[in-house]
Image (cartoon, rainbow, N blue to C red):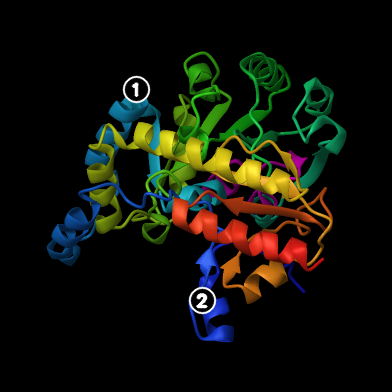
Amino acid sequence: MSKIYRHGGNVYEYERNTGFRPVDFSANINPLGMPDGAAEAYADAFAGCVNYPDPACSSLKEAVAYYENVPLSYLMCGCGADGLLFRICYGLKPKKAILTAPSFTEYEKALRAAGSAVDYHFLSERDGFCLTENILSDIPGHDIFIMANPDNPVGNIAERGLLEKIVSVCRRENCVFLADECFIDFTEKACSSKIFLKDFSNVIVLKAFTKMFAMPGLRLGYLMTANEDFTGLFEAAGQHWSVSYPAAVCGEAVLRDKDFPEKTRKYVADQSAFLKRALASSGFKIYGSEANFIFFRSSIYDLDKRLEKEGFMIRECSDYKGLGPGFYRIAVKTASDNAALIEAVERCVKHG
């Protein structure tokens, strides 16, 4: 029997079971929603759906290249970051991979689907689940190392010095380094691994429009690498038209709003501080949480079930390798939603 991987954002099952839509804190989407212009672009894209989309995503890649300040040749677009993740694994066919634990469960799923054996570098709660130089001795003997920065579900950030050591060890050991940076635009504290692309042909950076631009339903992502052999393998590892026309058009449109990421960062920082203070006051232990979500530990092992009864959905994290009962993750949402959630949490704590 195949293993079931659970994720946040399944509001549909909740609605089927209860008859109403919950306030979803389980999926980490920008609380400000999509940038202005996205809806208009989507409506305008309807007429273009009578034609096949551009398989090269030429216009979209030009917009992404400008946004990321990287050469056009470094880019490949795809059906969400997870779609590109599978193409990377199918294209490279690594025999042996190493992941941190806890980490995004889709990494393991994609690797195993491509026939890879998977080892784990377990992060210590004593260190706040932070990645340390201990990872360096675990990289040899592996074909690929995948990590997120900020990581998921904890939200810790890897320092530049450690990243430099990781990419250097990976190159020495003929190991691909894949940096998932889907949450990096929510903070200015993190160092992007795209700074290594020019000098390290073993580096791949993965990003998506899902989180910052609140477009999970359109499925749009991109990767960056200076290694043209890699992109050739990835293009051959999946369908020809992997990005729909509406997704490409909306992707271009949202990148035109130059102020949107900074406006988001300020809003998220303010609301994140509120949530951290409130959760700490309720006796919860907070870790990492440098992106648009809060990761914490509670002595209430059924907090997610209690909050479901209150109309809120949060991410219970015991299914993450390296974690157990009592670990939870919540998204940073609007001020009113955040306040309502905290009131519900306080009721749960009060009733023991």
- Disc 2: CA contacts within 10 A as few (<14), some (14-19) or many (>=20): few
Question: Looking at the rendering, in which quadrant would you find the N terminus?
Answer: bottom right
Q: Position of residue 34 (x, y in %)?
A: 32, 51
Location of residue 94 by image quarter: top right
Q: Amino acid at mark 2?
A: Tyr
Residue in the foreground of this view, choosing between 349 and 231: 349
> Distance between the Cα atoms at labels 1 and 2?
38 Å
Q: Position of residue 190 (x, y in %)?
A: 55, 25
Question: Looking at the rendering, in which quadrant would you find the C terminus?
Answer: bottom right
Residue 13 lies, with reference to residue 81, above or below; the image says below
Q: Is residue 146 magenta?
A: no
Q: Is residue 105 magenta?
A: yes
Q: Residue at x 49, y 23 (%)?
A: 194
Q: Amino acid at mark 1?
A: Asn
Please name the residue that numbered disc 2 is placed on: 12
324 sits to left or right of 290:
right
- Disc 1: CA contacts within 10 A as few (<14), some (14-19) or many (>=20): few
The span picked out in magenta is 87-108
Residue in the foreground of this view, choosing between 226 and 60: 60
Residue 77 lies, with reference to residue 188, above or below; the image says below
Residue 268 lies, with reference to residue 14, above or below; the image says above
Under circle 2, the secondary element is: helix
Location of residue 316 by image quarter: bottom right
Is residue 245 visible in the rendered structure shown here? yes
Instruction: Tell me the mark number nearer the camera, choosing from 1 and 2.
Output: 2
Q: Position of residue 11 (x, y in %)?
A: 52, 71
Q: Residue at x 53, y 55 (%)?
A: 339
Please name the residue that numbered disc 1 is placed on: 69
